[in-house]
Image (spheres, rainbow, N blue to C red):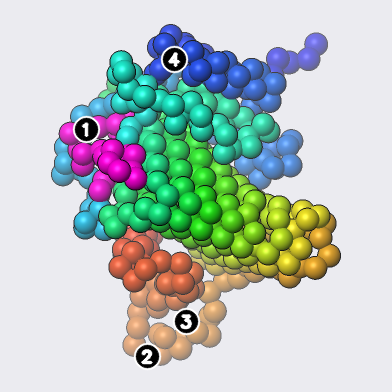
Amino acid sequence: MAETPLTFNNFLGSADPRALIGATRPWLTKFRQAAHDQLETLGLPTPSQEAWKYSNLPRALRALAAAAEGDAPLTVSPEAVSPEALPPRLRTDSRRLVFVNGVFNAELSDQPDEAEGLTLRPLSALLTQDGEPDDDLAENLGTVAEGEDQALYALNSERFQDGLLLEIGAQTSLSQTIEVLHLNGRSSEDRTAAHPRLLVLLADQAQAELIEQHWGLDDGQYLVNQVAEIRLGQAAKLTHLRLQQDGFGALHLANQHVELGRNASYRSFNLVTGAAFSRQEIRLRLIGEGAEVDLNGIYMLRGKQHADIHTTIDHRVPHTTAREVFRGVLDDEALAAFQGKIAVGRQAQKTDGRMLNKTLLLSDRAQIKTKPELEIFADDVQCAHGATTGEIDEDALFYLRSRGIGEERARALMVQAFLAETIEESLAEDLATQVKSYLDLWMQAQDTPLAAE
């Protein structure tokens, strides 16, 4: 007799539609029901699926559920956090909105805004207050993502309780950086499961800078499953910095969908240093001629951390450009997977797409699984991909030590030099300095045991 396939409900408990945000909105009830049906069809991703061959999500969920007390399902549990617990702003003059375990915290946040050309509101404010208009949500939520094959997207759509809408009108340029800080952790009694949602809509010729930071309050076991949908209109420009620094006992899952119109520009930088198990899936669709993408990032893992980065850049029209570079440093028994794909449709002549993945192994027990792909149906394109894996150059290390530099400092300098190129090419000088400071902290903590080990 065949075994019953595992589902998310086995680990997270079933969702109660009546307890979810916006339960009185008919359009949202329909949206959630469609997501529920999608989950029923897709089931739980397993390593038997090509996209998940390097990551065992059921095992990670099983470990998370085992850490919970008894058989109680994980629940969203916002907890009191003092302002002193917040990490410093990455831009001192930014407007920062804070979410604790996926729920907006007004006391820790700057005032949301709704002015001419700008809507910056928590989803909870739009979906729970009588008389609040939610037309933009109803018209746009779920329309950027092409997530028919993504169970994690459906899980978030079924269960999200809060999130953020950032909408910028035509020809509006935000002078103030928007910082979205997600503080994640657990109380002494509860484990948490957060499903935050992000919807970013930039109209024609709009410009903005967005910083997302996912910060672990502790190293306990909790789940984050985020979905971000980003639509850029004609000639719109978005710079997007995403920092995943969750606690070392966390399970961090993220789906990011970006759609670029004609002459739109999307510059992205991703940092991955946190969580026991993480997976970030990024899908970009270039649907307007002249669209440009810079998709870059670094990952730094140690102990028994596991991180999976899965990217798809889909060129659908002629004259589009994409550059993608991810570099990583792995120590101890850490394992990383990088799966990157450049897809060029039949109509996408004159495409220029390039992708590179480089990984530095600091331990003979660390592993990198890298799988760059090109799928090209057009015949007049310039596309390339590459991947390299190596260890620290012992000759270079000897040279530095012969100049009076200690071994630990010499190794740190070589790691910094390996990652610096991607950081400096991707970020403005002040943000590059901030990211390098996180790199320094990571190197200094190499001898500190991880809670997840």
Q: Which quadrant of the rendered structure holds the N terminus?
A: top right
Of 168 and 305, the residue lying toward us: 168
Residue 174, given in percent of the width and then of the height, sits at 32, 54
* Dot placed on the residue nearer the N-terminal end, 4 or 3: 4
Q: Amino acid at mark 3?
A: Leu
**Would you place residue 208 above or below residue 38 in this image?**
below
Q: Residue at x 68, y 64 (%)?
A: 319
Q: Secondary structure at mark 4?
A: loop
| Quarter location, residue 415 | bottom left
Q: Amino acid at mark 1?
A: Ala
Residue 421, given in percent of the width and then of the height, sits at 47, 74
Q: How many labels were placed on the picture? A: 4
The residue indicated by pointer 2 is 403
Q: Secondary structure at mark 3?
A: helix
Q: Where residue 397 is drawn, which disc sits there? A: 3
* Dot placed on the residue nearer the N-terminal end, 2 or 1: 1
- Disc nearest the viewer among 4 and 1: 4
Q: Is residue 235 visible?
A: yes
Q: Where residue 106 is drawn, which disc sits there? A: 1
Q: Secondary structure at mark 1?
A: helix
Q: Secondary structure at mark 2?
A: loop
For the residues marked 1 and 3, what is the alpha-carbon distance in whole angstroms?
Answer: 50 Å
* Dot placed on the residue nearer the N-terminal end, 4 or 2: 4
Q: Residue at x 63, y 37 (%)?
A: 146
